[in-house]
Amino acid sequence: MLISTFQPKLDNLEIRITNEETTEKVATVILSFLKKEKVNFIFGMHGGYTVGMGEELHNFPEIQFIHCQHEGGAAFMADGYAKASGKFGVVLTTAGPSLTNAFTGIISSFADGIPILLISGAVPHSKALIGAIQDTASFGMDVASSFKEAVRFHADIHNKDTFLQYFREAIRYLYRGKKGPVFLNIESDIFSQEVTHNFKYLRHSNNKFFDAESTDFVLDVLKKSHNAVIVAGNGVKLSKAQDELEVFANLLKIPVIVTPKGKSGFNNESELFLGSFGAGSNIIPDEYLKQEPIETIIALGTSFNEYSSDTWSKLIPKTYRIIQIDIDPYIIGRLFANTYGVHGDIKTTLNYLNDRIKKSELDFEHLNSLPIIKKYRNNFANTINPELYTSDKVPIKTPRLLKDVYDAFCDHIVNIFNDNGSCIFWLNHYMKFRKGWNFYSSLGFSSMGYAFSAAIGGALGDPSKVTIAFAGDGAAIMNGNELKTASEYDVPVFFIVLNDSRLGIVYHSTKAIYGRESVGTEFKKPIDFVKFAESLGVEAYRIEKPGEINRDFINELIKKGKPILFECMVDRDEMAPYAGRINQVKK
């Protein structure tokens, strides 16, 4: 076993306790923490039970409250903000329906491991059970408790004396282990009450941990393996380990496959990149796993769920062994018995492995797979019907549209937010990514209506990049009202609607299975998204021909610094590559 003196770098770890006591309002304590963390946005809707927070926000000009059109959109915006900024997102709701409206977005963040601070103003104790507005306890229901299974930590705060204890605990859960939402349900009168404390700023330990002994075993395995392949999931991005992964792959010269959520987790332009595997798999990864006698799979930050495993493909367990590295111990070995688990932060673990490989005298040249990768690239196209990339047919083919988008934005660093439905398969299979581009989706809970809202939060969280949102017409209309939010705050997002006047994935899947489409899958009266967007203050264009989205056009629009919507009239009869999903539904 290799012995290491490697010490992980503990970024952003600050614990300052003072003997000097301070008396502040509860709302001030919360907002001061956000200010220190440079979390500059709160997403939500005010109500009668949040006025204490709203009043205190006047004293914090660094923090902007984004008034959303629906709390579900607010939750998705906070998710997008967290993903793009690397911080945590904040959602503020009032009681009752305001809180329940945020439920789907909070579950989505929980499933994807995204840190969100959810604060809800609750009915004060003095008005409970007597029929106060939005008091669900008056009719025997505790709505707040329904969130317990969807958050990492939940506390009902009924008096100011318990606030500090619960607030500290919530902070701990925002920063440790597998991340996710935390929920503080605070009675409305408490926001304006004062508490005395002696901590100026307290942040608990971060995630920079790893298991050195288990990680040393990974090197022992690789030394004895004849070949290996890396499967990179969303955990690589959550850990911000893209650079470390590229170093690791290049040191070993082994191929890298990405999952749909991990699509931008590895340099797509690298000679070691095979393509995407999972929903809408590329051809080369599929053929590589079929034909090569893979001895070791190194799975980084992937749960091997339906989308990331290509509906639990039999190609994965046929491998002799799987080394699964993840921050979440509960998914390690969940599906495949031939799994060796390493629990820890992926970035720190890869840094350790890279350090050991560089400093050791071990020779890993036997793993060099570059000649084999080159052979597959020469023998296979990586997409189905690659001629669609250059098709000039009208209505526009979706692969051609994606190529136009790629070419038009190639001068810029881009964050792409993708919705659920057919867009998952279209983009995973056909969309190319440049190094530095980021790809975000919500495949943990597969919430439709995600991308438009999340992209608004993402653009606010990382204004240095150009932000794009992709959605089908069905998903776009679900939270399309948040175009008003983008317009209201001049948030520069390119909203791209793939309009086929139907719920494409359901339509084509049921037609393939039953010989006819399911009822309720088509819009008999198609939505005019140009008029819809313009009514909400967003500049909009209808795209009907290939080439209408081009570099010069995009560069001029970017200069405006405002939201733009493209309604793209795509070929409604062109089916996305979701054969695997159809086969799974058949079962």
Image (cartoon, rainbow, N blue to C red):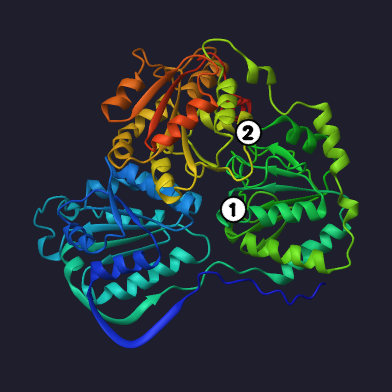
Give the quarter of the figure containing the N terminus. Answer: bottom right
Which label is found at residue 432?
2
Q: Is residue 122 left or right of residue 581?
A: left
For marks 2 and 1, the one nearer the N-term is 1
* Amino acid on which the number 2 mark rests in the picture: Lys
> Residue drawn 71% across and 74% down?
6
> Residue drawn 63% across and 33% down?
432
Determine crowd level at label 2: few under 14, some 14-19, many 20+ residues with C-alpha closer than 10 A: some
Residue at mark 1: 235
Q: Is 284 placed above or below 339 here?
A: above
> Residue drawn 68% across and 22% down?
384
Residue 343: image location, x then y, percent = 64, 63
Residue 245: image location, x then y, percent = 69, 54
Residue farthest to the bottom, as pictured: 19
* Amino acid on which the number 1 mark rests in the picture: Gly
Residue 248: image location, x then y, percent = 75, 56
So how many labels did they put on this image? 2
Residue 347 location, quadrant: bottom right
Residue 573 visible here: yes
Residue 18 location, quadrant: bottom left
Taking depth in this image into account, of 539 and 29 the one nearest to the observer is 539
